[in-house]
Image: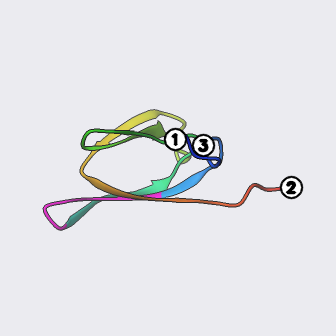
Amino acid sequence: METKFKDQPAEITCWSFGTEIFNGKSTGRVNRDGGGAVFVDAANGRLTAVDGECRIVYLPKAD
């Protein structure tokens, strides 16, 4: 299912067994895979894959 927010930056928080393992932002699209998320990390510009349960909150586009 496509989302209308797919090209917007997002805040991402991921957990593994109840422990937070990632908290940061993406530069844009976040792809979910079977056990986590794949995105470009806004902090370092690197393609990042995180395995765990992830909450993704899309941010409003800056005008």
Query: On screen, 12 above or below 47?
Result: below
* Within-10-Å neighbours for mark 2: few <14, some 14–19, many 20+: few
Q: CA distance from mark 2 to mark 1?
A: 23 Å
Q: CA distance from mark 3 to mark 1?
A: 20 Å
Which disc is residue 44 wearing?
1
* Within-10-Å neighbours for mark 3: few <14, some 14–19, many 20+: few
Q: Secondary structure at mark 1?
A: loop
Q: Is residue 52 left or right of residue 14?
A: left
Which disc is residue 6 wearing?
3
Query: On screen, 26 above or below 63?
Result: above
For marks 2 and 3 on the same chain, the one whose residue lies earlier in the sequence: 3
Which amino acid lies under the numbered mark 1 shown in the image of this protein?
Asn
For marks 3 and 1 on the same chain, the one whose residue lies earlier in the sequence: 3
Q: Nearer the viewer, residue 45 or 50?
A: 50
Q: Quadrant of residue 55?
A: bottom left
Look at mark 2 in the image and give the residue it sits on: 63
Question: Is 8 included in the stretch rendered in magenta?
Answer: no
Q: Nearer the viewer, mark 2 or mark 3?
A: 3
Residue at 56%, 40% (x, y): give it: 29
Residue at 24%, 51% (x, y): give it: 52
| Magenta span of residues | 12-18
* Residue 50 percent across, percent down from the top left: 31, 43
Q: Which residue in the rendered view is the most extreme toward the bottom? A: 18
